[in-house]
Amino acid sequence: MSNKRLKAIALLAVAYLITGKIGLLLVLDPGYASAIWPASGIALAGLLISGYSAWPGLWLGSFLLHFFHSLDICAGKGVLFVLALSSCIGAGAALQALLGSYLIKKTVEIPNDFRHFRHAFTFLTFGGPISCLVSATVGIGSLWGFGIIGSETLSFSWSTWWIGDTMGVLIFSAPILAWKYATALQRRRFPLLLGVPVLTCFVITFIAFYVQAQWEEGRLQLRFEKSVGELSILLENHLKANKRELQSLAFFYEGSKDLSPDEFKIFAQNILDRNPEIQALEWADFVPHEEREEFEKRIEIRERDSDGKMVPAEKREYYVPVTHIEPFVGNEATLGFDLASQQTRLEALLESAKSGEGIATGPVQLVQDSGASDPAFIIFTPTYASDEPIKITGYLLGVYRVDDLLFEAWRGWEQKGVAVELVDVTNQESPLRIYTNDAFLNLSEGRRYYESGKKTIIAGRLWKHRYLLTESYRAAHRSSQAWVTLVIGLLFTSLAGIFLLVRLGNSNLIHELMEKLKGDKERLDLFLEKLFASSSEGILICDQEGKVLLANVASATLLKSSVEKMIGTSFSSYFSMEGKEEGRHELHAEAVDGTKVPVEASLTKFEVEGKVQQLLIFTDVSGRRQQQRELLEINRELVERNRELDDFAYIASHDLKEPLRGISNYSQFLLEDYEKELDSITPSCSMTSS
């Protein structure tokens, strides 16, 4: 493995770990899914830049992040459990980045295709919503499979994870790629071009989401506090009503002598009908030891031994055996049981006798329950002799199962998502749990929940009510306003990212064209430089004031100077161009040694970066003018000779015409004198004369 690859793997692992820690600041229950997950954008951009071979860095970064994060959330589960869970989540993160980079490389050429909105949209679609299905499914599936989250929160947790990863890609992958493929000039302007618009959108969105989420959390907690506050009040009021029922029965019992079982059944049944949460109503006599023998003629006094079997009660100062029970069926085992034989019951008996009021026991197992049973407690209300108000004759008992009591007290109240625990804290050093509901039993160890605590006095006992707000409650009462704010804001932020990618693509295209033009310009400049240097014509370039900026060798030779000496000199030192317009002119150039040289010059004016410059191309025409003079001399000689020839031709013509005229005349004379003789000899002579 090369050092370059190891460096890329290590860099990706560290980057994922750091950005993941930032993402955990926005984590939502159950402690894994974040509203924005920047690490997903880092992962995708990292693989697109470093290549597929860097994927172990993503797995390692995700594994370390979730391992240390899970140690708190999964406290008590064991290290192997956390290792397995973190490995699965890390695999999902790596697979997501691999899939996204593969789809993008198959459809988009980075960064050239970014100059089109269609390609930029394709990049963000494949890298964001599509590939992010992988990590959300693997991650939430692992949490569900390992028992960290329940089925009731599965859909919300999955959607939160998917949205968080998608937003991380849409917001953070584009800036990284933009920086990677930006030119040096673009990187200098990067904070202004990218940092200001994208960061501003992100910060505004984050602040709006945070404020909205905090407001919704406060509203949810306020609603929760109000709701669970009602629970405490309902339970307390219900038990107060029950105590009044027991007290009224106790008063009735005190006013009656030797109440028979049938009479007790009639009065007790009325109370039981009105209060179905009461498991049983019982009467227990107060029996001093000296009266035990007489009492046992009717009912044997019993107690439980160490094995839980009912045996005759041991000798003690007094006994409090159960004498009447309603309903009797199902509670037969209680008859004759000595309440003073068990410490928890005895403490309540003594406190009740001391206060004269109904006092509840701590959690007890009922005698009629042979095995494990639901938590129960008993309220003892003392009765006194009518003729001796301080003499206790017995106790009226109300037997309660906690589940039945809460069911009746909280009838009609929706407990979904509220974890409830009731603890008897009368003895602060040894608190006793009275009740927990299913939601409380399903709480994850190590998790932190919003908690509301209440304390109430129930028949002389101090009960602590613990109500914990679970994710099920959040799901049932969650508002979508914060999420709507987040999604809209992040969509705007992602649009800024798309615009950045398009601008990057166009900038790179322009940069390529400029580089090509620069190469063409360099070749053109080289050609012009060679043409400028090798030209046989003098070339001068001057500024608007006539200062020589450039001169070629031909111009220096013609003006009998050097190129170096001519640069910076005045144009008027060599030519008189005052009043000359653009075009061709014939004039004299004055060389450095004072020689005047006839030249033919072409003057052109042009602008360079808003400044007027002058181009003068001139040619030495002294040779041409010498040739013109020679041609004029030759033409003059030709004209003279043509005139002489004309004179000669005239004279020759005159001298030849006279003899010919004489011959013609003599011939005419002969024809006139000898016409007949000549006709016969030469018939053609007539033709000659004609």
Image: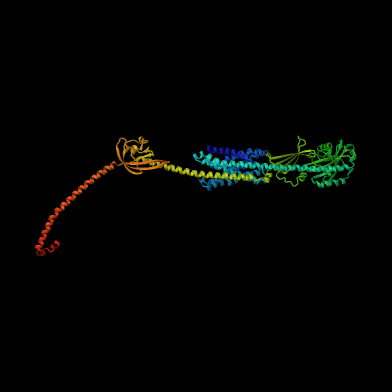
Please identify the quarter of the rendering in which residue 377 is found.
top right
- Would residue 474 be found to the left or right of residue 12 on screen? right
Q: Position of residue 121 (x, y in %)?
A: 55, 47
- Would residue 627 be found to the left or right of residue 438 on screen? left
Closer to us: 193 or 427 = 193
Say how many tags the image has. Answer: 0
- Picture layout, residue 680 above or below residue 648: below
> Is residue 53 visible in this depiction of the protein?
no
Closer to us: 82 or 667 = 667
Closer to us: 224 or 58 = 224
Colour scheme of this structure image? rainbow
Closer to us: 488 or 268 = 488
> Is residue 67 visible in this depiction of the protein?
yes
- Would residue 158 be found to the left or right of residue 226 on screen? left
Please identify the quarter of the rendering in which residue 34 is found.
top right
Residue depicted at 19% across the width and 49% down the height: 643
Quarter of the image containing the C terminus?
bottom left
Q: Position of residue 261 (x, y in %)?
A: 87, 45
Q: Position of residue 12 (x, y in %)?
A: 56, 39
Please identify the quarter of the rendering in which residue 158 is found.
top right
Q: Position of residue 119 (x, y in %)?
A: 53, 47
Quarter of the image containing the N terminus?
top right
